[in-house]
Image (tube, helix red, strand yellow):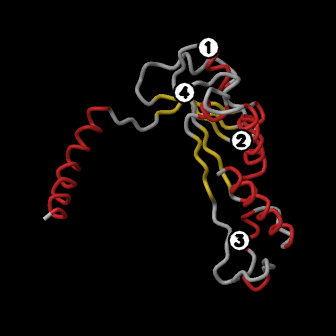
Amino acid sequence: KFSEFTEILSDRFTLLKANECKDIDEFNKKPIDKIKLPEGANPKTFSLNRQVIVIDEAAELFLASGKSNISHVQDITRKAIRLAAQGRAVGIHLIIATQKPDSNAISTQIKANLTGIVSFPMATHGASMSILGNGRAKELPAIPGRAIWRSGLDQIEVQTPFVSPDQVKTDLDKIAPIKEEKQLENNE
């Protein structure tokens, strides 16, 4: 999948260069009749939409294990670094999540290009240092949903929405009978 996004990244940069635009916002403001497109593209339906890539359990993706070989992990890491460094300009954004925030899980080049970081409580100062560069995530109060938001050099303590496991079960129980009824109707 990363290969697809790195191709999209290259195509978008080519398009921005042909239209003398510095980023996706400038391109999308350009009048349709002034856009220079690749041959065969329809200018009335063409725009650069933003795309979001979510990488959950990043440590599993970026660390070589028994399931993946080192060269494959290195290739994925190189592509993720390129997307993190250049993607925002062309409307490709990364969200990276990990439960193992050590220095090996996410490369420093990727972390340097993340514009915002949310860190929930960390068990150790080392884990907090790896994500935030300080121990604040280790020192968070034991309040469900409490986190640190870091944007650039600014860090603030925030309260995120929190749904308890009991509330999730209650909500799912409300939905489950509906699915069962539909399944019964389909089987008749």
Among the 4 quarters of the image, the one containing residue 106: top right
* Of callouts 2 and 4, the N-terminal one: 2
* Of callouts 4 and 1, the N-terminal one: 4
* Of callouts 1 and 2, the N-terminal one: 2
Q: CA distance from mark 2 to mark 4?
A: 19 Å
- Mark 4 or mark 1: which is in front? 4
Which image quarter is the C terminus in? Answer: bottom left
Pointer 4 local density, CA inside 10 Å: few below 14, some 14–19, many at least 20 = some
Q: CA distance from mark 4 to mark 1?
A: 14 Å
Residue 145: image location, x then y, percent: 44, 31
Q: Nearer the viewer, residue 43 or 149?
A: 43
Q: CA distance from mark 3 to mark 2?
A: 30 Å
Say which amino acid is labelled 3. Answer: Asn
Q: CA distance from mark 1 to mark 2?
A: 29 Å
Q: Residue at 68% across / 68% down in the picture?
A: 48
**In the rendered view, would you say 171 is above or below 41?**
above
Please tell me the numbered disc located at residue 125.
1
Q: Which residue is mark 3?
A: 28
Pointers 1 and 2 in contact (C-beta within 8 Å) = no
Callout 4: SS: loop
Q: In the displayed image of the protein, which residue is found farthest to the bottom? A: 33
Q: Which residue is mark 2?
A: 76
* Of callouts 3 and 4, the N-terminal one: 3
Q: CA distance from mark 1 to mark 3?
A: 44 Å
Q: Residue at 17% across / 62% down in the picture?
A: 187
Say which amino acid is labelled 2. Answer: Ile
